């Protein structure tokens, strides 16, 4: 089985709590896809949070009467597959980075799989947009410096923030922009701070199309704008049996957008 034993800590907690807490979902639990989620409550196993306060609010999550985690946070399931669950574990509930962050579980493995060190929280419509329409991948933009991609077929977690970091930039963050309608391509924005002549700093954003299966990127264009390429600034154009990422027609010819003579992507990403 390809699933790594990534969260032994969570599994140990779920066993240990069986002696001190009910082993079945508590009354008032709500159904979330194939799961039952207990109401949030102060956890007795988590340490102090970043403010020095004890008592992290967590939720126990069950799959067919099996305890998945006793310290869950912000759970959500795939709108395409109700067995696919993502939940987070706050830093106070782990002893190291391997025991906190965002995790994936679908009932077919013994342990959840860690997707990122940072927790994943956003509005539900944003979380739902992270699952690829072909039900093969999950984009995990945990924070501005940690954007990973999970491949359901291989079980691999790839760090796109590292792979697409623009060299010689002052700062670069990789941001999620959306999936193509067929799920075969992923749009990302590389928000880059660059140093101009004289030491002047400037912000620009690269639009990149990524093949999630090969992790190869295709540079599309650059916007003279901080964190650009929002909805309405790019488009997915039908091409044969797939879609191509392109500048939105309304921006064609705009001085805000230009194409660099050479791709700014790292060589290994193209």
Image: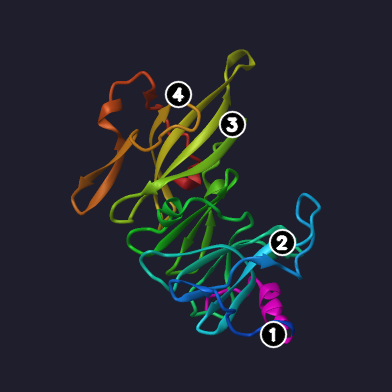
Residue behind mark 2: 56
> Image point 67% across, 67% down: which residue?
41
> How many residues crowd mark 3 within 10 Å: few (<14), some (14–19), many (20+)?
few
Please tell me whether mark 4 or mark 2 is closer to you in this view.
Answer: 2
Residue 87: x percent and y percent?
Answer: 56, 64
Residue lying farthest to the front in this orientation: 28
Contact, CB < 8 Å: mark 3 with mark 2? no
Give the mark nearer the N terminus: 1 vs 2.
Answer: 1
Q: Is residue 193 left or right of residue 12?
A: left
Q: Foreground residue, 62 or 109?
A: 62
Specify the label residue 169 is tagged with. 3
Q: In what element is the residue under mark 2?
A: loop
> Image point 27% across, 27% down: which residue?
250
> In this picture, which residue range is highlighted in magenta?
1-19
> Image point 42% across, 65% down: which residue?
78
Give the mark nearer the N terminus: 4 vs 2.
Answer: 2
Give the mark nearer the N terminus: 4 vs 1.
Answer: 1
Residue behind mark 1: 18
Give the mark nearer the N terminus: 3 vs 4.
Answer: 3
Please tell me whether mark 3 or mark 1 is closer to you in this view.
Answer: 1
> How many residues crowd mark 1 within 10 Å: few (<14), some (14–19), many (20+)?
few
């Amino acid at each position: 089985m390809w699933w790594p034993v990534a969260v032994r800590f969570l599994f140990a907690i779920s066993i240990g709590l069986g002696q001190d807490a009910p082993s079945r979902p508590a009354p008032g639990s709500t159904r979330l896809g194939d799961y039952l989620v207990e109401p949030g409550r102060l956890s007795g196993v988590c340490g102090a949070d970043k403010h020095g306060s004890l008592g992290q609010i967590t939720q126990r999550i069950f799959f067919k009467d099996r305890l998945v985690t006793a310290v869950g946070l912000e759970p959500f399931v795939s709108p395409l597959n109700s067995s696919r669950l993502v939940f987070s574990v706050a830093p106070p509930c782990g002893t190291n980075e391997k025991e906190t962050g965002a995790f994936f579980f679908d009932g077919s493995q013994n342990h959840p799989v860690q997707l990122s060190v940072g927790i994943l929280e956003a509005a539900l419509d944003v979380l739902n947009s992270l699952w690829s329409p072909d039900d093969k991948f999950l984009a995990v933009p945990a924070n501005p410096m940690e954007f990973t991609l999970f491949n359901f077929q291989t079980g691999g977690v790839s760090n796109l923030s590292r792979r697409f970091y623009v060299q010689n930039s002052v700062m670069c963050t990789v941001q999620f922009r959306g999936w193509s309608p067929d799920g075969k391509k992923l749009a990302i924005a590389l928000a880059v701070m660059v140093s101009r002549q004289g030491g002047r700093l400037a912000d620009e954003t690269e639009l990149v199309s990524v093949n999630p299966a090969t992790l190869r990127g295709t540079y599309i264009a650059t916007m003279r704008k901080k964190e650009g390429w929002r909805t309405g600034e790019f488009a997915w154009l039908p091409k044969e049996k797939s879609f191509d990422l392109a500048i939105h027609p309304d921006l064609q010819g705009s001085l805000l957008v230009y194409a660099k003579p050479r791709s700014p992507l790292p060589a290994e990403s193209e």
